[in-house]
């Protein structure tokens, strides 16, 4: 079964999803490529369908969202340590 949505309806659907989830999709990040003045396609948070890049394959896996290369586990001060704040929202990626 297939669904056909208009651009406005899909953006509204993304807004409804955003209440409970953090939505990720492949996005063009200008100037962040491996070489000078090149763009990179990686998974980022999206709010609208227009931000999603469908034509070019992403440079990184969607796994980068769930298992980041670098992650802060603890903040150490002089006599104490704290954990970074986390969000209660679930992850969703396409």
Image (cartoon, rainbow, N blue to C red):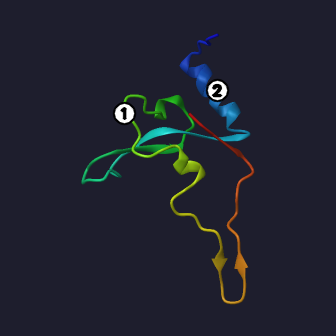
Instruction: Identify the residue under disc 2.
Output: 12
Q: Secondary structure at mark 1?
A: loop
**SS class of the residue under badge 2?**
helix
Instruction: List the single residue furthest toward the top.
Output: 1
Query: What residue is at 64 percent from the left and 69 percent from the top?
Result: 73
Q: Quadrant of residue 8?
A: top right
> Residue at point 66% right, 84% down?
77
Identify the residue shown where x is 71% and y is 75%: 82
Residue 72, x across and y down, in percent: 60, 68
Q: Where in the figure is residue 18, as x and y percent of width and height? A: 67, 38
- Above or below, comparing residue 70 to residue 79 in the picture: above
Q: Is residue 75 left or right of residue 56?
A: right
Give neighbour class at mark 1: few <14, some 14-19, many 20+ (Cα, 10 Å).
Answer: few
From the viewer's perspective, tell me whether residue 34 is left or right of residue 93: left
Looking at this view, is 70 or 75 the one in front? 70
Q: Residue at x 52, y 29 (%)?
A: 49
| Cα–Cα gap, marks 2 and 1 | 25 Å
């Amino acid at each position: 079964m297939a669904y056909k949505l208009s651009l406005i309806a899909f953006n509204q659907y993304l807004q409804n999803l955003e209440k409970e989830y953090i939505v990720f999709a492949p996005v063009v990040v200008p100037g962040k490529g491996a070489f000078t003045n090149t763009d990179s396609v990686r998974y980022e948070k999206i709010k609208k369908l227009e931000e999603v890049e469908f034509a070019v394959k992403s440079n990184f896996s969607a796994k980068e969202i769930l298992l980041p290369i670098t992650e802060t586990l603890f903040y150490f001060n002089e006599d104490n340590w704290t954990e970074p704040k986390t969000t209660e929202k679930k992850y969703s990626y396409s």
